[in-house]
Image (spheres, rainbow, N blue to C red):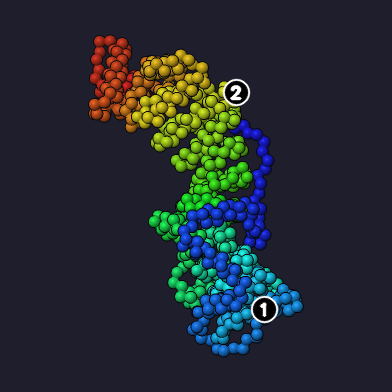
Amino acid sequence: MAEKPSNPPKKVEECPGGAPPQQHNEMEQLQLLQKDAGRDLTKEQNSARSSWRFIGQMFTNKSTWYQDMITMLTKRAAKPDPAPTQSIAPAPSMDSFGDRIVSSPNQVPGFVRNMHQRFMSNEPPDDRLFMDILRLTDAHPTDVAVTLLRCAPSCDRGAAIMWKTIASSGTTVDKVLPSLLCVMDGWPQQRMYTSDGDNKDVFSLAATRVVWEILRLPWCPEPFMEYSPHLVVALLFQVFISTEQVPEEVDSFWRTCQEEHSLSTSINRFAMQTLRALFHHLQCVDLLVAMERKCGWDTLLCVDTHHYAVGLLAREMRRVSIPLCSCIALRLLRLLNKEEPRWELAAMAFLVEVLDCLDLNEWGENILEIMTKHLKSESKEECHLALRGLVVLSQNPLMAKKMCNLSESLVQLLRNADGEEIRLTLAVFMNMLLNKDILVSSPTAPKLAEALRPLFDNDNSHIQVLSIQLYQEVMESVVEKGKKPLKMLVRESLLPLFFHCHSENRRVAESARETLLSALSFLNRKDLKHLLKTEDPWSFGERVLAEDRSQAGKHLRQALPYLESPQEPVREAAIRSIGIASMLMRGQQEELQVICEALQVLSQDESPSNTNLIVQVMLDERAASLNSSSGSRQPGQHQTPNKRRQSGAPGTADAEHS
C-alpha cells in the first residue's frame, strides 16, 4: 500500500535504577483521577480519605503526634517476643541528624540497624525515636529503605513499626516508594546499593511485605495513589512469576515469613491479596466485585489463563477509572520496549484492552512498533493480541497510513487456517482501506485479491462478509497502474460471487451482490450489470458462461465445490451453471465425466427438492445423449449397461453412472 514518509517512532524513556520518576503525562492523568474520585465521594468516604491526610499534618503538634503514634504502634509490643535481654547502644537523638553528627552518609545504615534493635527490645521506645525515623528517612530515603529490608526482610514487629511510622508522613513515604518499587520489580532478588558499600541482593517479596503492612493501616498514604499504576503492574508481575516459578531461596524465605506471621497463603495468592488491598484503598469496589463474580482472581493464579484474567481486569478497570488505565498502559509500554521483556503476554493482554484510552498521536508510533514485533511471534496468543492492537490503531487515519508497510505480512496471515487471525486481519485491512487517502499498490492488489477469494467460501459467515466487502474495497482503492493485473482475477470471481448472491444468509447475499456490481463496474461490463439489476439472475449466469467457451471447463470446476453447500439455493445455482457449462462442452468426455460423478452423488438424495429434480433432468438428458451416441456407432444393436461395460466401448462409465 502507498504511504507517506514518516518519522521514526519515539522511544519511551527508560527510568534509571528501576524506580522511575513519574512522567508528566502520568501525573496529569492521575490528578484527573483524584479529582474524579473526590467528586463522587460520600461523607463517609471523605472522612476516610481525610484521615491519612490528617496524619501527615500531625507533625505540627509534636506532643499530640508522639502520644498518638506511640499508642497506635506499640499496641502489638505489649506482649514482646521472647528474646534474651541484650545491651543496645543509645539511639541518636532527634537533633543528632545534622551535618555535625552524620558527617558521612555511610553512617546511615548503622543508625537504621540500631533503631530496629531498639524497637525489637523489651523496653518501650523513646518518644523521640519516631521523629528520628522520619528525619533520617527524609534525608536518606534509599539507605533507610534498603537497610531496613536487609535487616528485617520478613517485616518483623520492629520493622513494621518503623515502616508504619514512615507511612504516617506523605512526604517521607513519597521518597521511599521508588526504592520499594525498584526492589519489587526485581525477581527473585534485586541488587541494591547503600552508602556503606553494601550491595547485597534484597528479596522482591520483602518489599511486597512492606506494602502489605502499609495497606493494612486505616489510612492510605497519598503517594500510594500517585504510584498506584507502578504498584499494580509490579504486583501483577509477582502474581504471575511466583505462579510460574519459585526459586528455592525464595521458597525458604517465604516459609520463614509464614512461621513468623502465621501466613497460610501461597506466594502468588499473597501478592494477589496485596493487589486487592490496593484496589480497596483506591476505592475500586466495583472492580473487586466484578472480578470476584467472574472468577477473575482464581483465573489470575493459573499460568495458562493468567493473561486472560489480566485482560478481564483491564476491561473492568476502564469502567472504573480511565485515567488509571492510561497510566498503567504507559508503564506497560516501558516494559514492552525492553529488549527482553518479562511477562509480555499478560502486558499485551492489558494494553490492547485500553489502547483507545491513550493519545495515539503521541504514543501511536511506539505502540505500532511493539505490535509489529509481536505480529511475527510464534505464539498464537501473542499474534492475536498484536492483531487486536492493530485493529485499534488502524481506526486512526494517521496510524493507518503508517501501517501500509505491513501489507505483505498481513496478506500472509490471510492464508492461515486460524479463523481468529483471519477475522482480525480482515478487520485491519478494512479499517485501512476505509481511509480514502490510502491506495492499494500494484504489487499488493493481486496478492490481496488472490488471498481473499478462498475466504468467500469460509464456514464462518462473518469472515465471508468481511472478505467479500474487502474485495470490493480493493477494486475501488487500487492505483491505476494496478488495475490491469487485477482484472483477470476479478473476472474469475464473478461466478463465485454470483453463487453467494443466492445465500440464505442475508448479509452474505447483500455483500456478494454489492461486490458483484462493483466488479462489473471495474470490468466496465454495463450489459451484465443491467441484467443483474433487472433481477434476471439466470440470464446473467448464462451470459457469463457463454461468453468464452474456452473457459467453460474452468467455470465448471469453480461450480463443483458449491454442490456440497448446505444451502439449497446455492446448490441450485451451481447445478444450473454446470448444466449450461456441459452444453458448451459437448464432445469433451473427460470434463463431462467429472460432471456426472458429481451429480450422481446428489441424485442419491431422496429429499423432494428443486435441486434434485434439476439433477434428475440433467442426468436423463445426459443418458439420452450417450444412448444416441452409442447407437450411431453400432446401428441396429442395443446393449445393456453390463454388456457395454464388458465390451469396453467408449463412454461406458458415463452410461453406467446414468
Res 157 seen here = no
Near-viewer residue (587 or 439): 439
Position above or below: 357 against 556: below
Precedes in sequence: disc 1 or disc 2: 1
Residue 358 percent location from the top left of the image = 57, 47
Compared across the picture, whether 456 is left or right of 481 comes to left
Residue 389 % position (x, y): 53, 44
| Left or right of 476 on screen, residue 647 | left
Q: Nearer the viewer, mark 1 or mark 2?
A: 1
Q: Residues within 10 Å of mark 2 (few under 14, many from 20)?
A: few
- Identify the residue at horizontal 51%, vertical 72% (top origin): 254
- Residue at the spot 48% in from the left edge and 20% down from the top edge: 520
Q: Which disc number belongs to residue 627?
A: none
**Quarter-of-image position of residue 179:** bottom right
Tell me residue 258's x, y (percent).
Answer: 48, 74
Q: Which residue is mark 2?
A: 480
Neighbor class of circle 1 (other Cα within 10 Å; few <14, some 14-19, many 20+) is some
Image marks 1 and 2: residues in contact by CB distance under 8 Å: no
Question: Which element is circle 1 on?
Answer: helix
- As shown in the figure, which amino acid type bears the numbered disc 1? Met
The image position of residue 104, as x and y in percent, is 74, 75
Camera sees residue 465: yes
Mark pair 1, 2: CA separation: 82 Å
Q: Which three-letter amino acid code belongs to the residue tagged 2?
A: Glu
Which residue: 42% across, 57% down? 289
Q: Quadrant of the C terminus?
A: top left
**Front in this rendered view, residue 116 or 540:** 116
Residue 94: image tag: 1
Residue at the spot x=36%, y=31% of the render?
505
Position above or below: 61 against 311: below
Q: Secondary structure at mark 2?
A: helix
